Image (cartoon, rainbow, N blue to C red):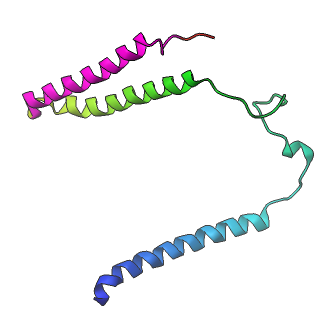
């Protein structure tokens, strides 16, 4: 049983050593860094423009929907590329499965278009 726990002890020692190295690096950085606080350093930085108003504002939901649609089709590409490379060896079953996958995604896209999600209105 001692041999069984020896692997865990090795991992624990390396994790502790890693945590010690991180703590040492942060501590040395804290000791060596200059500390000159000023009002200019405390103001938020917005691309070189002086901030106006509060920092809180609402974002329209259409940005999230566009991001979600992009993510869906980006993930689709991640699945299609390896499938296309191995298509000949996978056979007809893989072709049918990929056609079903693409049809389901296109059905979602058609639904989004019909609901007017992709219309950009300012």
Q: Nearer the viewer, residue 25 or 11?
A: 11
- Where's the N terminus, which quadrant? bottom left
Query: Which residues are the magenta region?
Result: 90-119
At x 85%, y 30%, the residue is 50
Task: Pinpoint residue 121: horizontal percent, then vertical percent.
Answer: 59, 10
Tell me the chief SS of the magenta region. Answer: helix
72 up-or-down from 35: above or below: above
Left or right relative to 31: residue 17: left
Q: Nearer the viewer, residue 111 or 87?
A: 111
Indicate the quadrant where residue 31 lies.
bottom right
Left or right relative to 14: residue 54: right
96 up-or-down from 27: above or below: above
Is residue 45 in the magenta section? no
- Where's the C terminus, which quadrant? top right
Is residue 113 in the magenta section? yes
Indicate the quadrant where residue 79 lies.
top left
At x 57%, y 24%, the residue is 61
At x 41%, y 12%, the residue is 113
Left or right relative to 95: residue 53: right
């Amino acid at each position: 049983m001692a041999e069984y726990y020896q692997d865990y002890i090795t991992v624990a020692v390396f994790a502790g050593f890693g945590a010690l190295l991180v703590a040492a690096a942060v501590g040395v950085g804290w000791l060596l860094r200059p500390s000159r606080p000023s009002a200019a350093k405390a103001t938020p930085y917005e691309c070189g423009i002086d901030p106006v108003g509060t920092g809180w504002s609402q974002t329209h939901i259409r940005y999230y929907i566009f991001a979600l649609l992009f993510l869906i089709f980006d993930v689709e590409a991640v699945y299609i590329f390896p499938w296309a490379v191995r298509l000949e060896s996978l056979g007809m079953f893989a072709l049918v499965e990929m056609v079903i996958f693409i049809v389901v995604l296109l059905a979602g896209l058609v639904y989004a278009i019909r609901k007017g999600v992709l219309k950009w209105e300012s």
